Amino acid sequence: MGNVLTPAMSAANVFITDPVQKISKHVHHSEMNNLEGEPPPECPMHKSTKKEAPPKYASECPINDMSQDEINPLNMMPPANQQPAPDQPFSLPTDRQVSTIPKATAENEFWVYPSQQMFWNAMLRKGWRWKSEDISPKDMDDIIKIHNANNEQAWLEVLKWEALHARECSTPRLRSFGGKASKYSPRARIRHWMGYELPFDRHDWIVDRCGKDVRYIIDYYDGGQVNDKYTFALLDVRPAMDSWENIWDRMKVTWWRWRYSNESKESEHATQT
């Protein structure tokens, strides 16, 4: 459940030179938004008209100095902004990709990722300024692909844990999510004390397990260069230890990992002798 993190991922890896990776860290890999009435809010996903007309979407990532009535509680984001910034050096697409992540707040609907324009505006709100970066339209296209790929990867990791409860619920759905980049999880802190790097971001996802809300913690670690599938983050995904059921799940998985890891080592040793 989640990639195994090794000591090789040192803190030095966070300081990367690729402008796509640098800029992508200004706004995290989870800027999905919801769909309700007029285009709603933001933040590593939606007003449908008639059936034949495509729905309108909205989105972006956490802003700390906004009043609560301006923030969508499902993703802790303010309303989306698809308008070009005043000094924007080039135009950006406003189309959005539908994710494979089902929404718990609406039947047969999925979370929708932000457009390149929305992502640009979100980065500006978080303090980024394009003049200090050598950025091109191709970079923005890559950033969106990285963002979306990391969310898809996170959902697949969540589903691995949810498979433990397949008999109870075979259709888990994402209810809400929010970024907590500055609030390191206890596990991340302990790993840091042991000499590992801190995650560059954290998200908490609330998953609807057929009527039961389950909180997941996702720590994002730098995995180096972006690959051909537009992934570079190593994800540590696990249920939060805020219920006995979650604690038991984590204990079981820890035991299985230890058991089968030892069996694999013994088998490998036997074949070599």
Image (cartoon, rainbow, N blue to C red):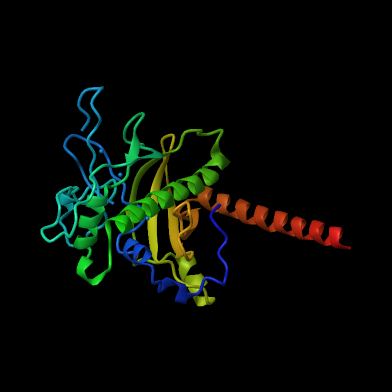
Residue 194 vertical placement versus 224 (above, below): below
Camera-nearest residue between 20 and 45: 20
Residue 165 spot, x, y in % from top left: 55, 39
In the rendered structure, the answer to whether residue 71 lies left or right of residue 162 reads left
Please tell me which residue is depicted at 44% across the width and 56% down the height of the picture.
218
Camera-nearest residue between 144 and 170: 144
Residue 242 spot, x, y in % from top left: 45, 54
Q: What count of labels does the image hold?
A: 0
For the question of whether residue 129 can be seen, the reply is: no
In the rendered structure, the answer to whether residue 202 lies left or right of residue 192 reads left
Residue 111 vertical placement versus 244 (above, below): above
Residue 209 vertical placement versus 262 (above, below): above
The image quadrant that residue 52 belongs to is top left
Residue 111 spot, x, y in % from top left: 34, 40
Please tell me which residue is depicted at 82% across the width and 62% down the height of the picture.
269
**Extreme left residue here?**
86
Camera-nearest residue between 117 and 78: 117
Residue 194 spot, x, y in % from top left: 54, 76
Camera-nearest residue between 7 and 65: 7
For the question of whether residue 149 can be seen, the reply is: yes
Please tell me which residue is depicted at 56% across the width and 33% down the height of the picture.
167
